[in-house]
Amino acid sequence: MVKLNVLELLEKQGRTKYWLYKQLGMSYQNFNRMVNNETQSIKLERIETLCLLLNCTPNDLFVIDSECEHTPQQ
């Protein structure tokens, strides 16, 4: 399963979750669901904004969690 790696990137940069929340200007409920990997999708515009704010690439932003049991649907 692909997961968002935002919290680790924030920690490495010495930034807080609250800082990112304020920068994104989205509802706290949606923001919290996104950074805690409790959402099914993220808009491309949001990915671009995250990359610009965190000075990273999409490769840095996402990780694949191979320990999560997920079978592809056919």
Image: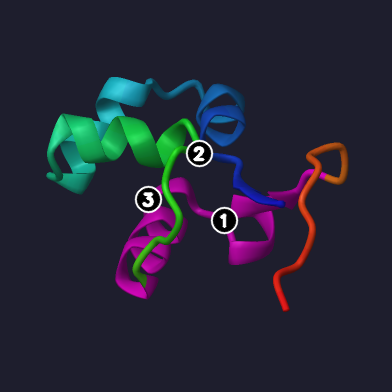
**Which mark identifies residue 37?**
2
Kindly identify the amino acid type of the residue bearing the numbered disc 2. Asn
Q: Nearer the viewer, mark 1 or mark 2?
A: 2
When the figure is inspected, residue 1 is found, relative to residue 7, above or below; the finding is below
Name the N-terminal-most of marks 3 and 2. Answer: 2
Image coordinates of residue 30 in percent, x first then y, are 24, 40
Q: CA distance from mark 1 to mark 2?
A: 18 Å
Using the image as rendered, state which of residue 72 and residue 6 is in the foreground.
72
Q: Is residue 74 above or below residue 17?
A: below
Quadrant housing residue 22: top left
Specify the label residue 53 is tagged with: 3
Q: What residue is rendered at 68% in x and 62% in y?
A: 59
x and y percentages locating residue 37 in the rendered image: 50, 39
The residue closer to the viewer here, 14 or 62, is 62
The boundaries of the magenta stretch are: 44-65
Tell me the residue that label 1 is attached to.
56
Give the left or right position of residue 71, taking residue 21 as reference: right
For mark 2, does the 10 Å Cα neighbourhood hold few (<14), some (14 to 19), or many (20 or more) residues? some
- Number of marks: 3
Mark-to-mark CA distance, 3 and 2? 19 Å
Task: Decide whether residue 47 is among the magenta residues.
Answer: yes
Amino acid under label 3? Leu
Secondary structure mostly seen in the magenta stretch: helix
Position of the C terminus, as image quadrant, is: bottom right
> Is residue 40 covered in magenta?
no
Query: Callout 1: few (<14), some (14-19), or many (20+) C-alpha neighbours within 10 Å?
Result: few
Circle on res. 24:
none
In the image, what residue occupies the spot 52% across and 38% down?
Answer: 6
Q: CA distance from mark 3 to mark 1?
A: 8 Å
